[in-house]
């Protein structure tokens, strides 16, 4: 499939007549504007013929399906993998900032322009914002190569309290139970965990009595960076067991079962309205509408279509008789700026190495598209000696250490890597 832009840069209907495309390029009647997916722009004629194209979007926290179809044919199919590294990056930054309090450094006046009371109405956490923006980026990219008439998005809102109760085997919440919640009438999360565990060490069974007082701690089963401060990630331990566990001498009980994480479900509930509102403001000339998962499931089973993210997006577009594409794209967004001054890893002697990696090494930057032995790949790692780590977009290694002289650059890196 070759995507086509008119003389004034507006998208028109794509073509599969590759011979005609070669002739247009050969005689200077068109030019290449994008390599992946292959897109040309007409230079002489200004055709504006379009058809009714619907883009189906299967929104998600970890995988997003995209499928643009007409009544007869699927014109674009891709799977987007939104960024999920923001929580870890911000947790690392928070750790470094807190550790500064224990170092003898110059005095810096307190700043209060990035506090809770300064957050505007409609503020969302950065980890949510970046995923919403990844959805918008991919939709905007498709709108630049295809003349979309309708964008149909599957949104979902999950009942988290019901999911937690089902996972724990507890009675399902009804009516007033939704207002109370699991931590109702508790001062804070720590007090709730102590009360839940009966003020007893879950490792050795120690608890305070009239003769002996036991100091109790609340321990994170997974690190705070990974599992957060949710009650499911906390357990009550006595002071001796807590110190012994961190020293590697005490093993925690393995019978405790953690609930399934609901982070992705929470994201879907937060983002659905914001995503629709922003798309309505960004694409006033396109019809934006939403649908629900149970409708997608009904039509997918009725039409006997295999369950994938791209197939769900195809069903959402509601052109069930359209001919499917054999090849789909993988879209991976990457962060474009890294203002880190020092490496996080501490060297011997307690010093931190400066983050001195330049933007370009031998003319290449991270995630440039290159060719090595007739294979296309991306620069995933660089060395000052000239050895580069080349991989495909899905992480498959092509060569872990290839000299830069054997590479040929075919495309600079972009915000969205498409392969």
Image: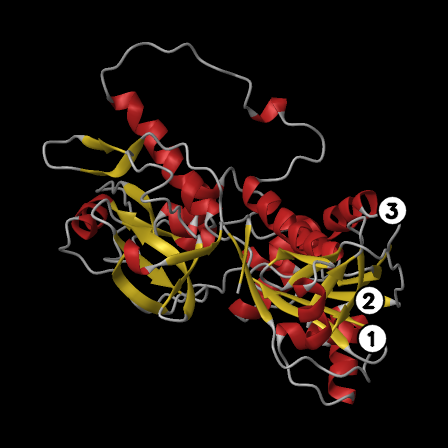
How much space separates mark 2 and mark 1, taking CA atoms? Answer: 8 Å
Residue located 79% across and 44% down the image: 282
Pick the quarter of the image with the N terminus. Answer: bottom right
Camera-side mark, 2 or 1: 2
CB atoms of marks 2 and 1 within 8 Å: yes
Task: Indicate left or right for 170 with 236 as reference.
Answer: right
Q: Which residue is mark 1?
A: 318
How much space separates mark 3 and mark 1, taking CA atoms? Answer: 22 Å
Q: Secondary structure at mark 3?
A: loop
Q: Secondary structure at mark 2?
A: strand
- Residue 356 seen from this side: yes
Q: Which residue is mark 3?
A: 284
Q: Of 309 and 291, which appears nearest the observer?
A: 309
Camera-side mark, 3 or 1: 3
Residue 247 percent coordinates (x, y): 15, 49
Residue 183 percent coordinates (x, y): 55, 48
Q: Earlier in the sequence, mark 3 or mark 1?
A: 3
Task: Indicate left or right for 195 with 72 as reference.
Answer: left
Q: Of 104 and 198, which appears nearest the observer?
A: 104
Q: Secondary structure at mark 1?
A: loop
Mark 2 Cα shell of 10 Å, populated few (<14), some (14-19), many (≥20) = many
Q: Which residue is mark 2?
A: 54
Residue 358 placement: quadrant: top left
């Amino acid at each position: 499939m070759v995507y086509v832009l008119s003389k004034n840069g507006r998208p028109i209907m794509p073509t599969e007549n590759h011979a005609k495309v070669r002739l247009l390029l050969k005689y200077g009647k068109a030019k290449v504007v994008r390599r992946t997916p292959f897109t040309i722009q007409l230079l002489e004629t200004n055709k504006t013929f379009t058809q009714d194209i619907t883009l189906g979007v299967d929104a998600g926290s970890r995988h997003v399906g995209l499928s643009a179809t007409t009544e007869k044919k699927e014109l674009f199919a891709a799977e987007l993998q939104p960024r999920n590294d923001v929580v870890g990056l911000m947790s690392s930054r928070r750790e470094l900032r807190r550790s500064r309090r224990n170092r003898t450094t110059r005095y810096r006046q307190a700043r209060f322009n990035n506090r809770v009371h300064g957050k505007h109405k409609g503020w969302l956490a950065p980890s949510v914002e970046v995923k919403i923006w990844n959805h918008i980026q991919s939709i905007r990219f498709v709108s630049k190569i295809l003349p979309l008439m309708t964008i149909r998005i599957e949104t979902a809102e999950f009942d988290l309290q019901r999911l937690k109760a089902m996972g724990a085997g507890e009675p399902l919440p009804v009516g007033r139970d939704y207002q109370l919640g699991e931590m109702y009438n508790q001062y804070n999360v720590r007090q709730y965990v102590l009360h839940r565990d009966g003020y007893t060490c879950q490792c050795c069974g120690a608890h305070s009595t009239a003769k002996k007082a036991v100091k109790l701690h609340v321990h994170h089963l997974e690190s705070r960076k990974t599992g957060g401060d949710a009650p499911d990630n906390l357990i009550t331990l006595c002071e001796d067991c807590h110190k012994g566990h961190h020293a590697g001498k005490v093993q925690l009980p393995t019978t405790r079962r953690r609930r399934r994480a609901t982070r992705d479900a929470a994201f879907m509930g937060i983002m659905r309205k914001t995503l629709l509102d922003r798309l309505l403001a960004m694409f006033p000339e396109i019809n934006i509408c939403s649908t629900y998962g149970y409708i997608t499931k009904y039509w997918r089973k009725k039409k006997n279509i295999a369950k994938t993210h791209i197939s769900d997006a195809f069903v959402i577009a509601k052109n069930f008789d359209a001919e499917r594409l054999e090849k789909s794209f993988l879209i991976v967004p990457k962060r474009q700026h890294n203002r880190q001054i020092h490496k996080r890893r501490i060297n011997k002697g307690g010093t931190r190495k400066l983050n001195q990696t330049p933007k370009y090494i031998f003319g290449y930057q991270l995630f440039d598209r290159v060719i090595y032995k007739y294979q296309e790949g991306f620069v995933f790692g660089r060395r000052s000696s000239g050895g580069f780590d080349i991989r495909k977009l899905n992480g498959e290694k092509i060569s872990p250490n290839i000299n830069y002289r054997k590479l040929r650059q075919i495309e600079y890196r972009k915000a969205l890597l498409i392969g």
